[in-house]
Image (tube, rainbow, N blue to C red):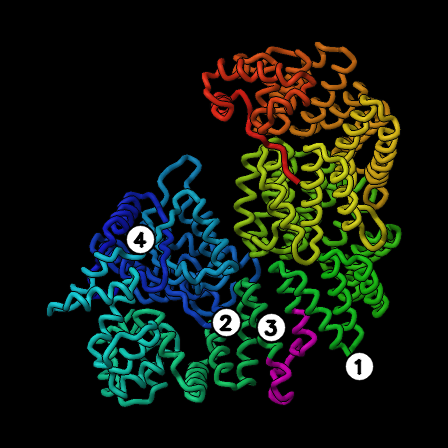
Amino acid sequence: MSQISISTPLIGRDDELARLSGVLQHARGGEARAVLVAGDAGVGKTRLLDEVTGRAATAGMTVLTGHCVDLGDVGLPYLPFTEVLGALAQDERFADALAAYPAVGRLLGGGAVGDSGGRLRLFEGIAGLLADLSDIAPLLLVLEDLHWADQSSRDLLRFLLSRGILQRSAGGAPTHRLAVLASYRADDLHRRHPLRPLLAELVRLPGVERLELRPMADGEVARLVRSLREAPLPDPTVRRIVERAEGNAFYAEELLAATGSGDGGVPSGLADVLLIRFEQLSDTAQQVLRTAAVAGRRVEHDLLRDAVRLPEDELETALREAIGRQLLVPGEGDTYAFRHALAREAVYADLLPGERARLHGAFARLLDGRGHRAESAAERAHHYRESHDLAEALAASLEAADHAQRVGAPAEELRHLEAALDLWSAVEPAARPSGEGVDRVRLMLRASAAAAHTGELHRAVSLTRAALAGVGQEADSELAARVRYTLAGNLMSVDNLTAAFAYSSEALAMIPADPPSRTWVWAAATHVMAARHVGENEVALRVARQALGTAEQLDVPDAQADLLISLAVLEGGGRRTEAGRERLREARELARRAGSTPVEMRALFNLAVGCFESGHLDECLPWLTEGLDRARRAGLLSSPYPMEMRYLQLLVLYTLGRWDDCVRAAHADADVLPAAGGYTMAPALYVGLARGDLGATDRARALLEGPFDWMATLVAGIALTDAAALRGDAEDAVERMRSTVAALTDDTGALPHVTVRLATLALSAVADRADDLRRKGDQDGARRWAETATELVELARTTAVHGEGGIPQGPEGQAWLARAEAEWTWAAAGPDAEAWARAVAAFDFGDVYEPARCRLRYAEALLAADRREEAAVEARAAREVFARLGATVLLEQVDELIRRGRLAEAPPTASLLTAREQDVLRLLARGRSNRQIGEELFITGKTASVHVSNILAKLGAASRTEAVAVAYRKGLIAPETTARG
């Protein structure tokens, strides 16, 4: 497990080396640390890690190294960790530690990891093993080239750093004598690279830091170049290499190595440089390197020998030559690796097409000859495909998919299944794999399930539609039904409800209920959900009760759990009642015992929603924490119910007034799941809007770009309607509200549940407009806006009273309705204090921000009724909440109300100026002239000029601009925070 030292000197990395040495020192003292080492290809990451691992070994640390390998679109689950385990297995010192974790041993032996429970045991086993090893001796784990890591390895690394080896005990005791160093190419991480969200998540963890290797300075490159040659180099040569290397150590070394080629100049591209150096080798050494390039970055000696088919002495001579030229370096376990991945890529790209295919075929056959090890299936599939042996590539792809499924890697399973489907029609029927479940339709169904598990919902729909097209008239009714109810389930996940109900109806009609069968039970369970979504509650109840009896008779516990969830939602008061939640808890336990994580996720989601809808917000969070933890361990965070739980968790934090927690969690979620912005940014977007973040409206509009997305449309609609209302734009608020409701209304005509909230937000702007026109004597204008208010309140009433499936909405919906009624009264006849008192009381279920908004309106209504003392109490209560939350938009409004109504002394920071001067100052900050100030405040321009002079004198300012700057600095006015449309 020791590292091969490289003779290249380490130059210009003193700070980085000191930083990593400090990490090792902390690790030896019992404080686990992790560092993510980033840098462009060739900048010196591997050389720096070589130096650090050498120092670690010298200091008595155990060094374990795992490499990720580029196999194109083929995933090889847990490859770097398998390499580490293989090294451990060869060392007798660690035999007892390995034996203590059977799940780890099964991965090493190619055995099945199993379902999500097996995946968790594997993750916990590896964490426990590393902890035990660190008890034997301080441990350094090095993972190289994370940009090529498979998703399963990324998931395992996330677990180790966030929950496993770095976590502290409850008492804050030291963690483990362990350090983790992981490198990746920063220049390979394009915008959608799968490593990006993981890195963003990891660097927020305590104990994890990022170290970026910048390009070397020109002087450091010059020192490096001169140190690589014993004889002095001409200054022009050094200057030319420094200029072309642009701070990249590998470029510099390659350019230097090419200077003696005698071709009269240095090549312009690095690939040319690499190939010139490669062509300086003997023909035999070139043949060996070409063959090694086809194998990948690393290759075993025996495999390379058998593929190149040279006598042992000739092979050894060629290898010595390649190592001497530092194109290859020897590694652990009789392996060789290209010194840099760019060198391998250049050699591979230079192969002739026929030569490339022939060598891939040779490696595929050699790997086959070693036996069909599950962990090598992806590698064999890659080589067979590149060699154009499609039949073998198909068989290996299916074997790789099976392996990915066993080790809990749905993303890799999907890729292998899609590769198999692409190959299927190109392979003669007689040459295709045979066996139960191995046909094109069943493979599509299996791929659709994998797609759903990874959150690729539209891909899941496409795959099941393709399966439906592939089901011929001769297909058995059971398979035809399976395809249809699977399609129905996938269509529900993308809110195509009418089509889902049609397909679930077809599925149920294709197979009889008697004799009982699993297929009928699942067809019925799917039909129950589809029927409920389109309002056919009686059908849903009847089928659910019948199917539950059949599921109990056949002992199908996962279907029993699924049906219990549907009944808990449909019967009585639904999931908002204690009886409904008790049934959901029963379903959760049944699903857990059956090992059905997706059904368990559905139960946990409904438990959380039931608590939220009934106003028990604090009870909601533990269910969400449990559900997301289960989803995270099972690799299902991107599947539909966990996505909903992620959104609900943020919404609960927002509602409880834990805004900073909400924003932090939203940022973390957005990094993990950047494609799911509607789910992962919504409540944080509302926070930004309330806090005067002018970019919030731009982010909301961005959600509406691209194909229609239900959640993104909902989130953007709420944010943009509220933004319009906050700036007093009644026309835009109403238009945003109407367009959002229209877009979210399903194909059955059912209004979205959020209509009551959207209508209320728009109503606030409408009420202000109607009241303003009425005060100005424009009765016709006021009446027109009052009519609009009536239209909006009717929508709010319809939604809140009838709710989903005819069940009235819970406390939140009823609270929004109470506020809608108060706004409607204001629009129709003026402010009604009692209506606002009811609205404040209605939000008393744990919400923090919304009751404060209602208190602000309540205070205005009380002031209009000349109930000044009561108005002062409500205004101060609202102000305290706005100040605590940082809700600057409404904080400014309530301060203005307090000043205008003389409800209390002005805030301490404003006591320097009179109330009128504060009004003038705010208009000054908006760039108004004296004449404009006079017009807006109904005073003369001369009087406005006097106020401006007084403000300048009191603030000691020489100009209007300086006065505004001083006022901002002293907190006399807040920056302009109203959202711009």
Amino acid carrying label 2: it is Val
Mark 2 vs 3: CB contact within 8 A = no
The range drawn in magenta is 423-446
- The answer, for residue 592, to whether it is visible in the render is yes
From the image, tell me which residue sits under label 1.
474
The residue lying at 44 percent from left, 44 percent from top is 205
Amino acid carrying label 4: it is Leu
The answer to whether residue 458 is above or below residue 892 is below
| Label 2, label 3: how far apart the Cα atoms are | 11 Å
Amino acid carrying label 1: it is Glu
Q: Secondary structure at mark 1?
A: loop
The answer to whether residue 409 is above or below residue 56 is below
From the image, tell me which residue sits under label 3.
418
- The answer, for residue 28, to whether it is visible in the render is no
Q: In which image quadrant can residue 117 be found?
A: bottom right
Amino acid carrying label 3: it is Glu
Label 4: few (<14), some (14–19) or many (≥20) C-alpha neighbours in 10 Å: many
| Label 1, label 2: how far apart the Cα atoms are | 35 Å
Q: Secondary structure at mark 2?
A: loop
From the image, tell me which residue sits under label 4.
139
From the image, tell me which residue sits under label 2.
74
Q: Is residue 439 magenta?
A: yes
